[in-house]
Image: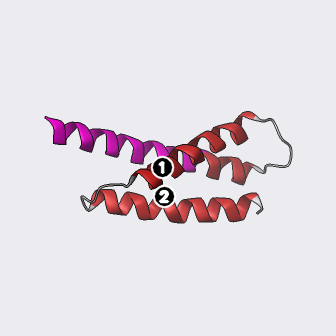
């Protein structure tokens, strides 16, 4: 799968997950595992100084990382507020 197709798929899944979070639905452990793996993969891609990544692709990778971070923060906050 090329990077552009990967990013399209990752954004589709992260957007769906974020919408579920905003509606108050819990995120299942399988989805959380997938999100963590995507975060690690994104960081690895960004850390490589590759000339085959365009500026647009790097910007989308950074945006994806931000989306993943937002979901992680939402899940963390939601789980803390349930415990309190």
Which residue occupies the foreground of this view, 28 or 23? 28
Crowd tier of the residue under label 1, counting other residues whose Cα lies within 10 Å: few below 14, some 14–19, many 20 or above: some
Coordinates of residue 72 in the picture (x, y in percent)? 41, 43
Quick one: SS at disc 2? helix
Image coordinates for residue 10, horizontal then vertical, percent: 58, 59
| Residue identifier under label 1 | 67
Q: Please tell me whether residue 15 belongs to the stretch shown in magenta.
A: no
Determine whether, in the image, residue 6 is placed left or right of residue 84.
right
Residue 83 left/right relative to 56? left
Are dots 2 and 1 in contact, CB under 8 Å?
Answer: yes
* Horizontal side, residue 80 vs residue 53: left or right: left
Q: Point out the tag, 2 or 1, that comes first from the N-terminus.
A: 2
Q: Is residue 47 left or right of residue 8?
A: right
x then y, percent, for residue 2? 77, 61
The residue that label 2 is drawn on is 14
- What span is in magenta? 62-84
């Amino acid at each position: 799968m090329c990077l552009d197709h990967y990013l399209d798929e990752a954004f589709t899944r992260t957007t769906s997950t974020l919408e579920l979070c905003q509606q108050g639905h819990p995120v299942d452990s399988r989805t959380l595992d997938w999100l963590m793996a995507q975060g690690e993969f994104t960081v690895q891609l960004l850390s490589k100084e590759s000339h085959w990544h365009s500026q647009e692709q790097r910007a989308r990778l950074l945006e994806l990382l931000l989306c993943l971070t937002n979901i992680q923060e939402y899940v963390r906050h939601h789980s803390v507020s349930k415990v309190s």
